Amino acid sequence: MNFQEKVFVVIRKIPEGKVSTYKEVACALKKSKAYRAVGNALNKNVSKLVPCHRVIKSDGSVGGFRWGSREKIKKLKKEGVKVKNGKIDLGKYLYKKH
């Protein structure tokens, strides 16, 4: 299994209404410094089965998304995640059980 596939396995575990960070995903893969590589892997995703929109920056900022930040925010809000001033409350929505 290549790195991208491993990232996708971890991302699929994030439940609806929760988010994780690029760094948390990298740590789950035992690659704590590979958070940019996680973002690059997610940017190449074309499957609706991999909820890339649930991965955000460590400071709670929404971060990038293949179809734009507005679309990412729209998807998160649809799942019940509150986004205020472009940020998400990690204390409330962070999923850490990878």
Image (cartoon, grey):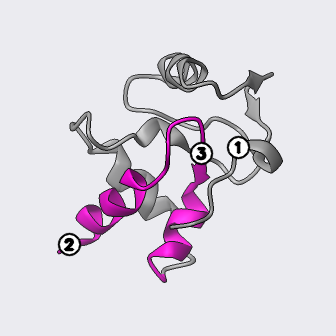
Q: Amino acid at mark 1?
A: Tyr
Q: CA distance from mark 3 to mark 2?
A: 23 Å
* Mark 3 or 2: the one toward you: 3
Q: Residues within 10 Å of mark 2 (few under 14, many from 20)?
A: few
Image position, residue 15 (x, y; %): 50, 45
Image position, residue 2 (x, y; %): 20, 72
Q: Residues within 10 Å of mark 3 (few under 14, many from 20)?
A: many
Query: Disc 1 or 3, which lies upstream in sequence?
Result: 3
Q: Which residues are magenta?
A: 1-30
Do the CB atoms of the residues marked 2 and 1 lie less than 8 Å apart?
no
Left or right side of 59 for 42: left
Vertical relation: 55 (above or below) 35? above
Vertical relation: 19 (above or below) 41? above
Disc assigned to residue 25: none
* Mark 2 or 1: the one toward you: 1
Q: Give the residue number, with chain letter if any, for mark 2.
A: 2
Disc assigned to residue 19: 3
Vertical relation: 20 (above or below) 16? below
Vertical relation: 36 (above or below) 53? below
Q: CA distance from mark 2 to mark 1?
A: 29 Å
* Residue 71 magenta: no
* Residue 21 magenta: yes
Do the CB atoms of the residues marked 1 and 3 lie less than 8 Å apart?
yes
Residue found at x 50% / y 37% = 16
Q: Give the residue number, with chain letter if any, for mark 1.
A: 93
Image position, residue 5 (x, y; %): 24, 63
